[in-house]
Amino acid sequence: MMHRMKTRWQLSCAILCTALSLGCALPGKGERDPDKQRLRTADADPGWLTHGRTYAEQRFSPLREIHEGNVQELGLAWSFDLGTTRGVEATPLVVDGTLYVTGPWSVVYALDAATGALRWRFDPEVPRSHARVTCCGVVNRGVAYHRGRVFVGTLDGRLIAIDAATGESVWSAQTTDPAEPYAITGAPRVVEGLVVIGNGGAEFGVRGYVSAYRAADGSRAWRTYTVPRDPSLSQESEALLRAESTWSGEFWKLGGGGTAWDSMAYDPELRLLYVGTGNGSPHTRWIRSPGGGDNLYLSSILALRPETGELVWHFQTTPADTWDYTSTQHMILAELEIEGRARKVLMQAPKNGFFYVLDRETGEFLSGAPYIAVSWATGLDANGRPIESQAHNFRDEGRMVNPGPFGGHNWQPMSFHPGTGLVYLPTHEIASFYKVDPDFAVRHRALNTGLDYSMYVHYDGNEEASVEAHLVAWDPLRQRAAWRVPHRAAYSGGTLATAGNLVFQGSSDGRLVAYRATDGEKLWELPVGTGIMAAPITYQLGGDQYVAIAAGWGSGFALSAGPAALEAGVQGAGRMLAFKLGASEAMPPAPPPLPAPPGAPLPVTASAEDLERGSALFTRVCMVCHGPAAIAGGSIKDLRWASAESHQVFDEIVLGGARESLGMPSFSDLLSAEDVRLIQQYILSRAAAAARSGVSSEHP
Ligand code: CA
């Protein structure tokens, strides 16, 4: 079987082509509108106009002033302090010399892309109580740009159009029911004059959907739900009616899930908008859909008509998901020659551990293979359907399964280099213990996964995290790794590929690194004083090529992975950094490590039995943000270091909401005063244990 890459290498790497492709861009529908044309020809722009640089989301730049021969001369040109430790996941945009980046709480910054000087800052003033219904940090992955406006989705579900010149709000649309636990963390995309936005919340209990709003005035053009509603009501579309029979039980009472919280891509020639959907709500299928069924359209890639949101085709990567294996991961559109035939493909490495190549015109499965050592499935059948491993089925008994809910690859964007034909993606193998919660009951505005997390109760803070992590260069034709670079810690950043034969990636342990794209040799690295999860971008301005990254540690991993997150050894200082050849600005210093753990500031008076009850409550309610066994992962304050003053007002904080402005809302609807006393005693016992065992203090 001969696989051959259609070689457009010379074309794609020559800067000349930048000018050429501008001249050659084929006009299609709506091309008379110069603003629509601008996004379609984003490849020729010296900036970075849309989330994945172009509609194809390849995150490949034809710029090559910085190349494998001179990347050693790269230095810091400027930095901008985002003033946060709450997790930075944004891909910045660069439009006409201004860089637009988002930080936690959906705050938007407009910076001079040459100097880092602040032009404006837009704070949507997200109510801090909304932190309670975000599984994975109060993060934001970036903005969209169109016709002089910047669009941001806010954590509390608004879509806001901002004047790109002044930073003033132009319109705002509430895209979710504020009473329901939805949250937006993903970047909008603009297609055909519509701003498309999804949302998250499937850990808490919601029904997923994606919506499109007219860029001009914020009016809603369409909304497409990803899972059916109560079958006694008529479904909103034929596609949902077809999905209905793949569900059983009273799934709609639990939300169903399938939230489209991150990835999209667009093919203007095929007029198909691709949207990735997430896990079920609750996670465990035996609770969600007890009679079985594939539960369409969970964990799927959906191809939609951009004008109407109508479903054209779907491909479900994980039928009947029960592991939180979302298909919301980055999708890349490319042209590959497969068995002598030019194919328009869509590539994705969803959480489930398999790399997929699909025909993006029809959704046909072309090939797939595991990109990590998966244990939940033994392979894919001829149609790309996973063959589940019965030995790892956890319906009746808890099982260790790889990957766990962090996936083999999460939201961190990949990149595709048309010259090397390789996809560069950050992978990790963080196996997890899955067990069905035998006492599951839906609780409003609480974590409703249907999983039992009690095994985490007995962490003592000195666990060796068993984690493998790599930067992988994946050959999508041969479906195997061309090369891998091991990482010290998991959850490193997304990637950028450039025509200079380079791949850039930030690491969770605090370095920005350049690798040779062809063989993975490390050519340059610089410590940046904070962990990196987001993906770098590159742009040309004033004759210089810049590489820029929104750095900062945080996310669901830093919040709830405890010891695995501490392997990174970083804290979460958020900062925007830009590099160019010959620059030598000083890197802002890393935050100093905390002093040794002081021990319990108040006495532990509870009985062993009460501490068990406290630990169970903590694990059920607090762990998702404060970490297993109260071990924080470097983003928010580790409760074992909490002061006597904080403990003296503990119930005012947990029940009264005294620290809501810091993102710690009240839990008075879920916890009683006695519950809070037990949780506090448990935290004090953890503080005492940390002091006794001399836990490393290289984290807050
Ligand atoms: Ca999830």
Image: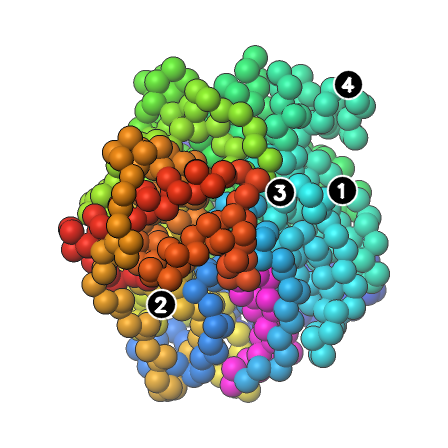
Name the element at disc 4: loop
Question: Please, is residue 584 above or below residue 477 in the view?
Answer: below
Residue 373 appears left or right of 239: left
Q: Nearer the viewer, residue 526 or 638?
A: 638
Specify the label residue 223 is tagged with. Answer: 1
Q: Residue at x 56, y 28 (%)?
A: 442
* Cα–Cα span, label 4 and label 3: 24 Å
Name the element at disc 1: strand
* Cα–Cα span, label 2 and label 1: 39 Å
Specify the label residue 181 is tagged with. Answer: 3
Q: Earlier in the sequence, mark 4 or mark 1?
A: 1
Q: Earlier in the sequence, mark 4 or mark 3?
A: 3
* Label 1 packing within 10 angstroms: few (<14), some (14-19), many (20+): some
Extent of the magenta region: 93-116
Label pair 2/3, CB-CB below 8 angstroms:
no
* Label 3 packing within 10 angstroms: few (<14), some (14-19), many (20+): many
Label pair 4/1, CB-CB below 8 angstroms:
no
* Cα–Cα span, label 3 and label 1: 18 Å
* Label 4 packing within 10 angstroms: few (<14), some (14-19), many (20+): few
Q: Amino acid at mark 2?
A: Thr
Residue pointed to by mark 4: 232
* Cα–Cα span, label 2 and label 3: 31 Å
Q: Quadrant of residue 252?
A: top right
Question: Please, is residue 362 above or below residue 189 in the view?
Answer: above
Whether the residue under disc 4 has CB within 8 Å of ligand 1? no
